[in-house]
Amino acid sequence: MLKWYENPAADADVIISSRVRLARNLVKYPFPTRLSSTDASAAIRAMHASVFTEENRPNVEAEGLKFVDLSHISNWDLNILAERHIISPSMVSQAALRGLVYNDNENISVMFNEEDHLRIQSIFVGQDLDAAFEAANRLDDLMGQNLDYAFDAEFGFLTSCPTNTGTGLRASYMLHIPLLESTGSLKVEVGILTKAGFTMRGIHGEGSESLGSIYQISNQITLGKTEDEIIHELKYYTGQLVEKELSARGIMARDYLAEVADSFWRSYGILSYCRKISLPEAMRHLSAIRLGVMLGRVMGLAENPFNGTIYNIMTNIRPYGLQKIMGPATDPRHLDILRADYFRKVFVR
Amino acid sequence: MLKWYENPAADADVIISSRVRLARNLVKYPFPTRLSSTDASAAIRAMHASVFTEENRPNVEAEGLKFVDLSHISNWDLNILAERHIISPSMVSQAALRGLVYNDNENISVMFNEEDHLRIQSIFVGQDLDAAFEAANRLDDLMGQNLDYAFDAEFGFLTSCPTNTGTGLRASYMLHIPLLESTGSLKVEVGILTKAGFTMRGIHGEGSESLGSIYQISNQITLGKTEDEIIHELKYYTGQLVEKELSARGIMARDYLAEVADSFWRSYGILSYCRKISLPEAMRHLSAIRLGVMLGRVMGLAENPFNGTIYNIMTNIRPYGLQKIMGPATDPRHLDILRADYFRKVFVR
């Protein structure tokens, strides 16, 4: 079964994926930041039970949902889950007892005792925010019928951090916008988005650097807007970005074909032959190749040159996932060598 | 028949070639800078006659010497001769009547009416300054018996520019010294050489930039030293440079194999796949490949990856030679595209 990021649709367009995250808390327990380990265990048990009921069984089996007690798995495996966006980076180092429910496709997950008791997440490949919202809602309903959520008539869902209070909804798109970035118009766009209550971040969320011209755009405001308004506005602003990126691509394809082809083939050549490569540099080349493939019909390369989606390769070259595939690195320098070795394995020849 | 730069020995070591140039002038005519066109023609006729005598015939035929009236050939072909070091760059734009004698191997040439009436030149592949000196001397003797050279008992051979007066000898080596360059020790070396009366220049002589870490070292002083002293000292100082370059290469091969291999293979990848490339960038990659080939036994690439010597490719990618091979460029941007196309033709696959 293909994971969502192995789906060729992940390389189809500017929008790589659509994500929805719902924050929920239980009335019965303090927020996770103030939770005793006894209460944390009890909360996990309650949340676990709310999913895996006899009644929910058909749904659970249809989705392929399984539970992992994160307190019992290695730091290594936690990092791999974070690299794949199944858990948040902050979940890796968190000391409290924590759990995770996720499915085989890796597009649905629920974190227990992250910043909030429940973080329900759904990722759909490409532009499919409605489907992601529906899937998250389904899971929310499925659990909500068995749990007492902290909800205030005036403020809505109560959350550990006030920025999530209200709908508890964070909707986001992951975008590949190399030309908005290189033409410098991204800065202007970010200014517009920020005023409208949206935020742009790098590939690995808050505070993370942008690698490979991949950005996440998400709503900053959860209070005072309905879920539909948030999703509608996110679609609107993202649509603007996509249109500008595509328009720049049109100009490139028309007037700078030699440059596009050169950039594509140089990155192809470097990734094919290098013997060591850092993550940021590799991401730059993957970005150039992704752009080249999209403009590719005109330059004699119609297909993705890799076995697997470019987005999946972007994920596989991160430190933990890379070592899972290529074996352990002896030091950070060795990681760059393993990364180069990995590339020579994944090119279609 | 292989030209000297097509000989695999051109890629064998730090020293690419050894060159000797003798400056001579005729008593009978003013120096070329002050020569009327009538006198210029007469001088050319006299110099031509001095080579192609009945007596010299066996020698001329053995060497394959032929005469070209440079006033009758196109600017384009003049530039190609200059790119191949058969004539000097200043000979291209010179208005005066001028001629050239050279051989098929392109390692022997005599310029008529350059800065001096006669510039006798001999290039030998690799470290072979003695052979180059002998060949130039042979030609000097062959012409000298039929010409009256401007010679002063005190000052020696008289020349248009006083820096050539005396022996009229310029001896030089062409060196590939990427590690002396990248480690920064070249500056120190140049200081030492300058004090000793030698000079370092780029691949295309006086005032030319260094491309591909290729440098020419030659004597600055022609007066007050015998020919043997000049050659002996040049060998000595060049020997020092070669030793330092080889010592740095030894350290690279021992401690930085991954870096050497990475640099080699990246340059290989870029030259294999790029769609446009400037001359300086191409020279950088050829330099990395030449270094990699020399350290190559350790990295699974024992042989030169090109059809032809790397040095010959360095010459073929210059503007005029390149267009001779690839057809005319419509503009400078097109030249970079032709250069990339050329590389895809010359890799051994």
Image: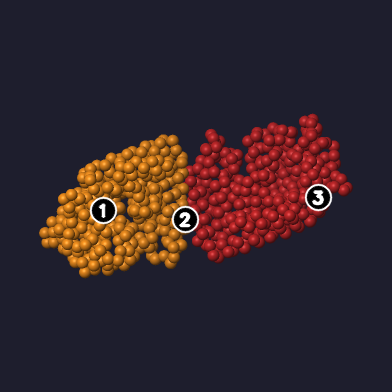
Chain colours: A red, B orange
For discs 3 and 2, the disc positioned in front in the rendered view: 3
Question: Spatial distance from mark 3 to mark 1, Cα to Cα?
Answer: 87 Å
SS at mark 2 in the image: loop
Name the foreground residue: B225 vs A198.
B225
Q: Hey, what amino acid is under mark 2?
A: Cys
Q: Looking at the image, which residue sits at the far right?
A: A153
Mark sitting on residue A223: 3
Taking the image as shown, residue A283 lies to the left or right of residue B222, namely right
For discs 3 and 1, the disc positioned in front in the rendered view: 1
Question: Spatial distance from mark 3 to mark 2, Cα to Cα?
Answer: 51 Å
Q: Hey, what amino acid is under mark 1?
A: Pro
Q: Hey, what amino acid is under mark 3?
A: Leu
Q: Residue at x 20, y 50 (%)?
A: B155
Going from the N terminus, do you reach mark 1 or mark 2 first? 1
Residue A37 drawn at (x, y percent) = 77, 31
Name the foreground residue: B266 vs A13.
B266
- Whether discs 1 and 2 lie on one chain: the answer is yes
SS at mark 1 in the image: helix
Determine which residue is flagged by label 2: B274
Name the chain letter of the residue that bears numbered label 1: B
Task: Write down the quadrant of residue B119 in the picture.
Answer: bottom left
Name the foreground residue: B150 vs B51.
B150
